[in-house]
Image (tube, grey):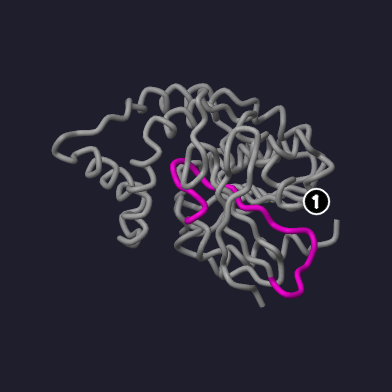
Amino acid sequence: MGGPLRKGYVDTSGGQIHYRAVQPAQALAPPLVLLHQTASASAMYAGLMGALTGRRLLALDTPGFGGSFTPEQPLTIPYCAARLLEALAGLDVSECDLFGHHTGAALAVQMAHARPGLVRRLVLSGPPLLSPEQKAALKASLRPFSLAPDGSHLTAIWARLRGRDPDLPLAVVHRETLLTAAAGEQAQQAYQAVFAQDFAGQLQALAQPVLLLAGEHDTLRASLEPAAALARNGRSRVLPGATPYVCDREPARLAEIIAEFLAAPD
């Protein structure tokens, strides 16, 4: 069984990283580290952490998001990954498995590439392997964040989230709207950081077992097969009916898939 969900902070050279943790009385090794999408935070993993059992779980807020510090410099994937690696060291993690969703998948690949001895296995949900055309379209869609006197910046975020998943529970839409508004310009920087990362080259260089997932209706569904083709020790799986919010919508199904992969023989 899993233990209670606890929250805390750990110091890094840039500032404090906020995290959520579950520590069972008898935990399987190594711990599983969960990395969130933009512009969410570790809060998106509350349901999944409740569904995963028998393992130490750590969900980290990326710099600039949730309760973590906001860097004075523009965000990059290497910078954020380095601070998250410092946080894991501060939490006495010497080996771990990584689960990353969207931007979290980019961070997971960067961390495994930088510290291959630390990371045993990776699960990448919605891997952000983007073609030049996809990057150009996404860059064109980004708009500077600003506060509107009538609060319309909040309704615009709300509408965008509902467009990605019209049936997303309102409590999740509310949470993600507030997290996105709180992140402000950091969200735009995080997207630009993903565009600049050599995700393909880093993924191709990994020797660890990698499970690549994508929901049938995920905005990054088209990236699954190209990313899986690059992974030297990878397998892929499509989740029928799933959306970009599979972690909130179907935590039990996702937990079962993750646990099966992490327990499988090499």
Residue extending farthest to the left is 150
Looking at the image, which is closer to me, 255 or 218?
255
Q: Quarter-wise, where is residue 51 in the image?
A: bottom right
The answer to whether residue 40 shows anywhere in this view is yes
Residue for point 53% across, 58% down: 45
Vertical comparison of 140 with 153: above or below: above
Residue for point 29% across, 42% down: 157
In the rendered image, residue 55 lying in the magenta stretch gets the answer no
Q: In this view, does 249 lie to the left or right of 151?
A: right
In the rendered image, residue 31 lying in the magenta stretch gets the answer yes
Residue for point 76% across, 74% down: 26
Q: Is residue 137 left or right of residue 263?
A: left
Residue extending farthest to the bottom is 1
The location of residue 166, given as percent across then percent down, is 31, 55
Vertical comparison of 170 with 113: above or below: below
Quarter containing the C terminus: bottom right
Kindly state the secondary structure of the residue where label 1 is placed. Answer: loop
Quarter containing the N terminus: bottom right
* Label 1 crowd (10 A; few <14 / some 14-19 / many >=20): some
Q: Quarter-wise, where is residue 117 in the image?
A: top right
Q: Quarter-wise, where is residue 5 in the image?
A: bottom right
Looking at the image, which is closer to me, 24 or 117?
24
Amino acid type assigned to the residue bearing label 1 in the image: Glu
The location of residue 257, given as percent across then percent down, is 65, 63
Magenta stretch in the rendered image = 24-43
Looking at the image, which is closer to me, 195 or 44?
44
Q: Mark 1 points at which residue?
A: 95
